[in-house]
Image: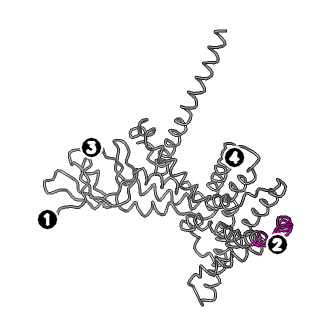
Amino acid sequence: MQTKQYQKLLRKLRAWVLSLLTPALISTGVATFFIWAHLARIDQTGIFFDSVSFSSLFNYLMVFAFVSILFFCVVLFMPSLLTGLFIYHDQVTSEQREALTEKNIRNILFTSMMSVLIFFGWFFLSNLTESEKTPQVSVQLGLVWICSIILSVCQHPRLTLNRVRGTGFWHTTGTVLFMHFLQPALFALAAIAWIFPIELFLRAMEFPDGTSEFRQALTIIALSIFLVIFSLMPGVVFLRLRGRTGLLQKVGVTGGIMACVLFLICMFVHAVPALILTMFLRTAGIIDLRPHNVAIPVTAYPAEYFREAVWQGKQSEDRKFYLLQAVKLYSLGNIRLICPQSVVQPWKKSLRYQVLDTDFDDSVRRELQEAVSHCRRVSSQELLTLERLPSA
């Protein structure tokens, strides 16, 4: 009897220990991967073990890592979040509820695709005709709303008749207005939420020299539709699971779908991991691309350490310090990787991409690593930062 009680207590204790250690290990692993990925990207992995400590990873870096991933997922899956919020959970029979949910999902999907064609079609048509380049946002939103109303009327007539059969005038009027005017307006808002994630992708996109405007337009529209479909997938899965499983299972399955979609997008658009990584590095204070005036003791480093022309530095009047203008490409623990300002442009260029062109990704990464080769590793105790140099 005592042996069984002891084994039962041991199983409970093991479950508690695993529930406490597993999130900590995952969080520490994510933060470690982010730091290693940054150093591998700039070809400076040699300073990893000198700068990283377990306490720094466990305390705050893991928080910034998860916040960066969460923020990017919120922006990327904004259409899904709004879809789950705007689709009404009808308290009717399960058969009618499922049919109505499926029709509303198709309504949002088709409305989102039509909104892509309306917005980009308006823009490219304006460029071709050279008549009006100012975007008429209100008119475009109105067209998206009209498309959603047409889709709603075409898809819901039988469901609408079933819901209003045998009801009074005011109830019938309210149901029709809600289903075919108010809810399509909400769907139109959810349909144009793809603007937020697509802006991140279009801002970093480049086209090879000589690419025609027609091909650019097709690429942008195809990428937008691709993002619309994949950004709506978690919301669609959540809605289809609503009423069938518990909340924890729905959140787990939806989170898994988000992770798979994010991984798939990262496979096709290699700039996405770099964008998430940059968000983490900036929020955690690991990089700072603003130019700073720094002073470094002459006795700590040989004269050749900062003799390259890219540094454009000088010695202080007492000949005890190197005075440099530098950016910090890595700042963690006791290690600082300071770089000349010429590294900023290759860094920004490395965040750009060309669709399905791995050669472009490799070339900008090599250019970044070449620029980083001029950076210098210094100790944090020896680095003095000046807001501005005193006038002579």
Residue under label 4, please give it. 250
Decide which of tag 3 and tag 4 comes sooner along the chain. 4
Residue that label 1 marks: 392
Task: Name the image quarter holding the C terminus.
Answer: bottom left
SS of the residue under disc 2: helix
Say whether disc 4 or disc 1 marks the residue closer to the N-terminus: 4
> Where is mark 2, residue-wise?
154
Task: Provide residue 110's location: percent of width, then percent of height.
Answer: 74, 68
Furthest toward the front, the residue is: 168
- Between circles 3 and 2, the one closer to the viewer is 2
Query: Along the polypeptide, which appears first: circle 4 or circle 2?
Result: 2
Identify the main secondary structure in magenta: helix
- In the image, taking residue 106 as reference, residue 6 lies left or right, namely left
Crowding at dot 2, Cα within 10 Å, few <14 / some 14-19 / many 20+, comes out as few
Q: CA distance from mark 4 to mark 2?
A: 31 Å
Q: Are marks 2 and 1 in contact (CB under 8 Å)?
A: no
Graded by Cα atoms within 10 Å as few (under 14), some (14 to 19) or many (20 or more), the crowding at tag 3 reads few
Residue kind at label 2, given as amino acid type: Cys
Compared to residue 34, the image places residue 128 above or below, namely below
Identified by mark 1, the residue type is Ala
Q: CA distance from mark 2 to mark 1?
A: 78 Å
Give the amino acid at mark 4: Lys
User: Which element is circle 3 on?
Assistant: helix
Structural distance between the alpha carbons of marks 3 and 2: 70 Å
Residue 87 image point, x, y percent: 70, 61
Q: In the image, which residues are magenta?
A: 153-173
Residue 83 point in image, percent of width and height:
67, 61
Front of the two marks 2 and 1: 2
Query: Label 1 near label 4: C-beta < 8 Å?
Result: no
Q: Is residue 298 left or right of residue 196?
A: left
Residue pictured at 64% horizontal, 14% vertical:
5
